[in-house]
Image (spheres, grey):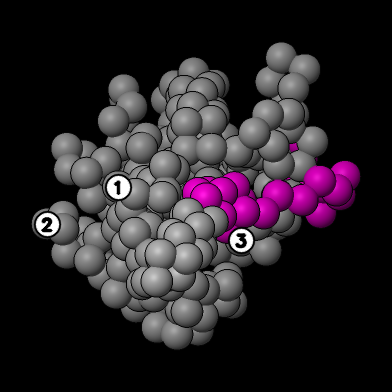
Amino acid sequence: MRRIGRLLLVCLVALVLSAASWPRQLLYFPTHHDRANGLTPWVEQGELIGFARTVPGPKNVWLMLHGNGGQAADRAYALPSFAAADSVYILEYPGYGRRPGEPSKESLDQAARQAYLLLRRQYPATPVCVVGESLGSGPACSLAEAEPPPDKIVLVAPFDKLHRVGQHHYWFLPVRLLLPDDWDNIEALKGYRGRVEIFGAREDKVIPMKFAKALAESRPGTVFREIEGGHNDWATPGRVSIRNP
């Protein structure tokens, strides 16, 4: 019995140690190609920090914080969801594309804040808004505390608290204890006084729609829109319209 007990203990320790590596293995899936996909490189002080579609005299400027896979240039598919009169800047996360660094909650939030403040300085008289897609809803909501705050925040297939999504998929493990990169979007939006619009996908298996609904219901005045399709189908023409106002 003692041998069996020791064996079970070893197996449990191995399982926990394996699970501890999840934040890097299951949260971040960067790619590193050189294609711009028709977008303009967004360069600051000689460093590529993203890609953009710019227009002269934009009515609004959007900072897009994308999901956990691929890289910024892969989000050209999202452009038809924005108004033609708006400029769109898609942030490249540290460790994604050709941007150096390592992805983490801290590095993504810091990169998002730096990019947002850069756009505020560049467009002092133009509304600057934020859109977060999937995992990008975490750094997007973190900007609610920026000064000045975004004029509007739009979230597509977001979560309320990241560990709750992990717990949904891995119900047999203490995900909250094993997930150091854990965004709490409910807490981040608590003091935000601007407009928030949330899109939840009805057939989403990655971040089930109940988490987007929970986030919307946590904040009075939030507009929630249910759309068809799965997690990666939101850019299908006609499903999501990203606008300000």
Residue 229 in the figure: left or right of residue 176: right
Of mark 1 and mark 2, the one earlier in the sequence is 1
Q: Which residues are magenta?
A: 17-41
CA separation in Å, label 3 and label 1: 25 Å
Amino acid type at image mark 2: Pro
Disc 2 marks which residue?
A: 220
Disc 1 marks which residue?
A: 184
Picture residue at 17% right of the left edge, 37% below the top: 191
Position in image of residue 91 (x %, y %): 61, 39
CA separation in Å, label 1 and label 2: 17 Å
**Residue 135 visible here:** no
Residue 76 lies, with reference to residue 49, above or below; the image says below
Residue 239 in the figure: left or right of residue 150: right
Q: Nearer the viewer, residue 240 or 179?
A: 179
Name the disc covering residue 78, or none. Answer: 3
Picture residue at 62% right of the left edge, 54% below the top: 25
CA separation in Å, label 3 and label 2: 28 Å
Q: Nearer the viewer, mark 3 or mark 1?
A: 1
Q: Secondary structure at mark 2?
A: loop
Query: How many other residues sit within 10 Å of disc 2, few (<14), some (14-19) or many (≥20)?
Result: few
Of mark 3 and mark 2, the one earlier in the sequence is 3
Q: Pointers 3 and 2 in contact (CB under 8 A)?
A: no
Amino acid type at image mark 3: Ala
Query: How many other residues sit within 10 Å of disc 1, few (<14), some (14-19) or many (≥20)?
Result: some
Name the disc covering residue 86, or none. Answer: none
Amino acid type at image mark 1: Asp
Position in image of residue 96 (x %, y %): 71, 42
- As drawn, the residue found furthest toward the top would be 45
Asked where in the image residue 40 lies, by quadrant, the reply is: top right
**Residue 62 visible here:** yes
Position in image of residue 41 (x %, y %): 77, 36
Q: Nearer the viewer, mark 1 or mark 2?
A: 1
